[in-house]
Image (tube, rainbow, N blue to C red):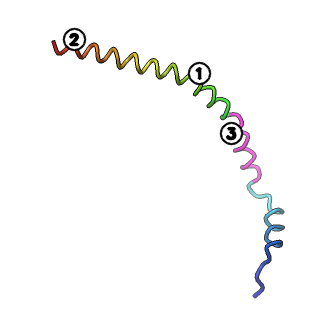
Amino acid sequence: MKKPSLMGLLRRVHRDEEGAVSLETILIIGAIALPILIFLIKVGWPRVKSFFNQGMSDLESERSGATQ
């Protein structure tokens, strides 16, 4: 039995276009999602962090009032 050559394998893989539409769709979704993710990290995360820290400080102040 003849062993397939590397060049023959590369030619066969290059001609095979199965899955190309899926790959293009994933790349387009990534190109749209990446700027949105960067925006959320830069703008949204400080607001979420501030909201969480304010809630934690409110909770701590209420806890000290509840123990008295």
Residue located 22% across and 14% down the image:
64
State the CA–CA distance, disc 1 to disc 3: 20 Å
Amino acid tagged 1? Val
| Residues drawn in magenta | 20-32
Does residue 20 sit above or below 65 in this rendering? below
Q: Quadrant of residue 38?
A: top right
Nearest to N terminus: mark 3 or mark 2: 3
Locate residue 50, reporting x and y percent.
46, 18
Residue located 80% across and 58% down the image:
17
Tag shown at residue 10: none
Local crowd size for mark 3, using a 10 Å CA cut-off: few (<14), some (14–19), many (≥20): few
- Can you identify the residue that label 2 sits on? 65
As drawn, is 21 to the left or to the right of 44?
right
- Can you identify the residue that label 3 sits on? 30
Q: Is residue 22 magenta?
A: yes
Local crowd size for mark 2, using a 10 Å CA cut-off: few (<14), some (14–19), many (≥20): few
**Extreme residue toward the bottom, this view:** 1
Locate residue 48, reporting x and y percent.
48, 22
Amino acid tagged 2? Gly
Residue located 17% across and 15% down the image:
67
